Every structure is written in structure tokens, then in C-alpha cells.
């Protein structure tokens, strides 16, 4: 499913302007669309729901069509996704039963699912400006519903709000009423999927543009080095460090040299964990098929070795995603790989800067222009232009003078014991230094690198 395979959702089409027939679809250039109106398209001017899709999108099955949502399943070759298009009624009383209906629907789907549209309520107080500053009971119920179903907000690019009202500042109100939610399975499957809030045009709602496979920005070759804690579990890692660590160099130069060695070793020896796992599963299947035909000690030992290797691989995979996710509160023991993986994807999407607004109010998404904009901002921020030179006057009695004993204590050099104690006390997976090495590297490889660090 690429960004060219389209589903279009219209919320609140008026009964006076649209009917439920295919002939009423407004002409769209070069495309052939099929439609699915909600069970009750509109009541006078109260609005309704209408879903359209291009025929080339794949096989579309309509599983349910209600007054406030439409549920379809889209199948394209081996890819499957359920999409629930939502238009929650403006009246709290009318949408009171919607969350229960959607809960039953979502809990009954085991495949990837995406739920999006106009929910007519917010989750957090910062999703609105103007008007009453409190969260309504309906907003709290909506937030509880999201948490109960473990749904993930796919975030957005562009303007913060999707609905606005009022032509004068004193009457102006804007809210984020429209959003796209998904399950963890969907977020893992389409890790780079993005939601863009398009500009307000002829409606008081902004259109949302969901891309499963957005345009690729940035240069992977510029990705900084990061030490992988999973490398420590490889049988040849310690031997590699012993052979490659140059104790004649200062620590920074030795680390820089080690980076190149580790990059090559990771590519040639450690390899891609996902590909290694696929290869191991295939080998296990082959051995187990042979065992069904002819049992032997050699095959049983081969199966045991592969299972042991597979277990190590699962530990490495979990460590990789635990390190990337930076989650600390999950109890170890059970496999938490999926949780760590999902947390990582969410954090990456939240932290990634894909659009910025320049001084003229225009949205910038081109990578080189984003870099220029960021550099220009911080150059101005940290320049001395337009800055008041404020110097706090010194106290009349001056600075407190240190005693000779205090000065002596401050000048005592750090001992090796002090350094070791400090290293051991650090969180092993704390954020790395600019060189890409986290405390876990020093803690596990102190025998090999400690002398250089304390020198």
C-alpha cells in the first residue's frame, strides 16, 4: 500500500448537497472511485459519513456501516489492514454509545487496524486554544477509551489544530478534533507512516493525509555511530576488543579508531538480527523435517544447538530494542521485545522533525532548508545582537574566600577507585556521549579499556 493507493473520507456531507448514489460522487481527475456511505448519511444539516476508495487500492470488504463509523478491510496482495472511518456526532448524548461500539469492533480484530476521522472531542488540554480551558467528562472518557484499547496516536505534521471557529480573537476557538489512531501491530508494520494536517480550505476542519510509505528524507550515511549493547553477548566480542583497543592512544582517539573496527565487525560478523533470525528459523524447520523422517543423535544435537543459538538471538533482539526504547520500568524476565520495539517507533516518530515554520509562517519540509532554518535560528539565539548586557552586581563583601584545606581538597586528583566507582554507578543504557558509547561499554569492558580511561 503506497501513498498513491487512496482512501478518501468525507465527514459531515450535507443531505441537501449529496445523496448516497455513486452518481453523486464529485468528479475526481484520472481516478475511478467506489463509495460506501454510512447507514444514515445525513439528517438535514447534522452531517454524516462517506468513504470513497480508488479501485486499484486492492480488495475492499465493508464489514460495517453505521451512522458514526464505517469499517472496511483492505487486502492488497499479502498486506491486510482494517480501517475504521469515524465521524463522532457533535452531541455528547448521541456519541455516548460510540466508544462502546468501537471497543467491541476493535477487540474483535486480530489484524492491523487503523481508526481515524473526526472524534469531536480532545484528549489533552493543550489540544485546544480559546474557550473553556477544562477537559469535559466526554474528553476524559475518550482518553480512557484510547488507553483501555492500547491505541497509539500516530501524531501529525503541520498545524496543531484541525478545527476552528470564530472570526474575531475574542470568539476564536481551535481544537484538535481529528486524529488517526492505530494498534501496536499497525505501528510496527508501517513504522514510517505519517499523518499530515493539511491547510484549512473551504471547511472549518482541516483534512488529514495518512501516508503508509512517505517520502524518504535525510541521508542514512550521516547516521552517527551508536554502540549496541547486544554486541556484548556475541562470543567473539571481548576477543575483538582485546585485539583492537589501542592502549597507546588517549581515550577519545582510541574510541574513534574502535568505531571503524566495530562497524566492520557488525556488518561482517554480528549481522542483521532480523535476517539471522529468519535464517535460523528456516534451518530449524529443515532439521525438524529431517527428524520426522529419521531420528539420529546428530540431528537432535543439531536441533539443540540451533535452539540455543535462537534463544541467544532473541536476547540480542530484545536488548537492541530495549536500548533504543530507553524504557526502564519494564520488569525483565519475560520477552519484552515487542513492547520495546513499539516504544522505540513511537519515540522516533515523536522526536523526528519533519516540518518547521519559518519566520514568514510558511511550513518547510525540504531537508537542506530545514538544516538552514535550524542553524539560522540558533545562530541568532546565541549571538550578542539585541541582547541586554545585564551584569549582576557583586555583593559588597565580595566572594566568600575558600580555606587552604578546601583548596587542597579541590586540587586532589581523582583516583582510579573514584573513576571506577563513578562508572559503576551510572545507568548502563543512559544516553551516549557524542562518540556513541554508553556506560554499559565501559562497565562490561573495563578490563580491556580501564587503564586508558584512568591514565
Image: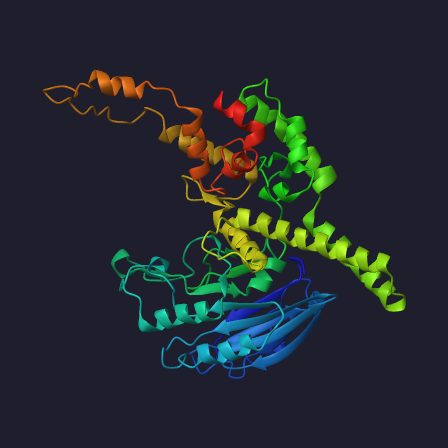
Q: Is residue 176 left or right of residue 386?
A: right
- Residue 434: in sight, yes or no? yes
In the displayed structure, 437 sits above or below 16; it is: above
Q: Is residue 406 above or below residue 381?
A: above
In the figure, 188 relative to 266: above or below? below
The quarter holding residue 231 reads top right
In terms of image quadrants, where is residue 297? bottom right
Residue 89 placement (x, y as % from top left): 42, 77
Quadrant housing the N terminus: bottom right
**Who's the residue at 32% across and 25% down the image?**
385
- At x 66%, y 37%, the residue is 237
Task: Tell me: 62 left or right of 46.
Answer: right
Q: Position of residue 367 (x, y in %)?
A: 56, 39
Q: Residue furthest right?
A: 294
Q: Nearer the viewer, residue 127 or 228?
A: 228
Number of numbered discs on residues? 0
Seen from the viewer's position, the closer of residues 95 and 305 is 305
Amino acid at each position: 500500500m503506497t501513498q498513491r493507493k487512496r482512501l478518501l473520507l468525507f465527514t459531515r456531507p450535507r443531505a441537501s448537497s449529496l445523496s448516497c448514489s455513486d452518481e453523486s460522487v464529485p468528479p475526481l481527475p484520472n481516478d475511478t472511485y467506489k463509495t460506501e456511505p454510512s447507514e444514515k448519511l445525513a439528517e438535514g444539516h447534522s452531517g454524516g459519513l462517506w468513504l470513497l476508495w480508488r479501485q486499484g487500492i486492492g480488495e475492499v470488504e465493508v464489514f460495517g456501516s453505521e451512522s458514526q463509523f464505517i469499517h472496511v478491510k483492505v487486502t492488497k496482495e499479502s498486506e491486510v489492514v482494517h480501517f475504521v472511518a469515524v465521524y463522532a456526532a457533535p452531541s455528547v448524548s448521541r456519541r455516548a454509545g460510540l466508544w462502546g461500539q468501537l471497543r467491541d469492533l476493535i477487540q474483535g480484530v486480530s489484524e492491523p487496524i487503523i481508526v481515524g476521522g473526526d472524534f469531536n472531542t480532545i484528549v489533552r488540554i493543550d489540544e485546544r486554544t480559546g474557550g473553556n480551558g477544562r477537559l469535559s467528562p466526554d474528553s476524559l472518557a475518550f482518553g480512557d477509551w484510547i488507553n483501555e484499547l492500547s491505541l497509539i496516536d500516530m501524531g501529525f505534521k503541520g498545524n496543531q489544530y484541525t478545527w476552528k471557529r470564530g472570526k474575531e480573537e475574542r470568539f476564536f476557538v481551535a481544537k484538535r478534533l481529528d486524529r488517526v489512531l492505530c494498534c501496536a501491530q499497525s505501528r510496527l508494520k508501517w513504522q514510517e507512516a505519517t499523518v499530515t494536517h493539511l491547510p484549512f480550505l473551504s471547511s472549518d476542519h482541516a483534512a488529514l493525509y495518512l501516508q503508509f510509505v512517505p517520502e524518504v528524507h535525510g541521508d542514512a550515511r550521516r547516521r552517527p555511530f551508536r554502540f549496541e549493547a547486544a554486541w556484548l553477548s556475541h562470543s567473539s566480542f571481548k576477543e575483538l576488543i582485546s585485539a583492537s583497543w589501542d592502549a597507546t592512544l588517549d581515550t577519545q582517539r582510541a574510541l574513534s579508531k574502535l568505531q571503524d573496527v566495530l562497524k566492520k565487525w557488525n556488518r561482517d560478523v554480528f549481522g542483521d538480527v532480523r535476517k539471522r533470525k529468519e535464517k535460523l528459523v528456516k534451518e530449524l524447520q529443515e532439521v525438524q523435517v529431517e527428524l520426522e523422517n529419521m531420528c539420529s543423535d546428530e540431528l537432535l544435537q543439531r536441533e539443540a544447538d540451533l535452539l540455543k543459538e535462537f534463544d541467544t538471538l532473541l536476547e540480542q533482539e530484545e536488548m537492541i530494542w530495549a536500548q533504543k526504547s530507553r524504557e526502564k520500568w519494564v520488569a525483565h524476565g519475560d520477552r519484552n521485545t515487542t513492547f520495546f520495539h513499539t516504544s522505540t517507533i513511537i519515540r522516533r516518530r515523536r522526536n523526528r522533525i519533519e516540518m518547521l515554520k519559518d519566520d514568514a509562517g510558511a511550513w518547510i519540509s525540504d531537508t537542506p532548508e530545514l538544516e538552514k532554518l535550524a542553524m539560522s535560528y540558533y545562530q541568532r539565539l546565541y549571538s550578542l545582537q539585541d541582547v541586554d548586557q545585564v551584569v549582576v552586581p557583586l555583593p559588597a563583601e565580595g566572594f566568600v574566600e575558600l580555606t587552604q584545606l578546601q583548596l587542597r581538597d579541590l586540587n586532589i586528583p581523582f583516583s582510579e577507585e573514584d573513576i571506577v566507582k563513578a562508572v559503576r554507578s551510572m545507568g548502563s543504557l543512559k544516553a551516549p556521549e557524542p562518540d556513541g558509547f554508553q556506560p554499559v561499554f565501559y562497565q562490561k569492558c573495563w578490563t580491556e579499556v580501564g587503564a586508558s580511561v584512568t591514565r
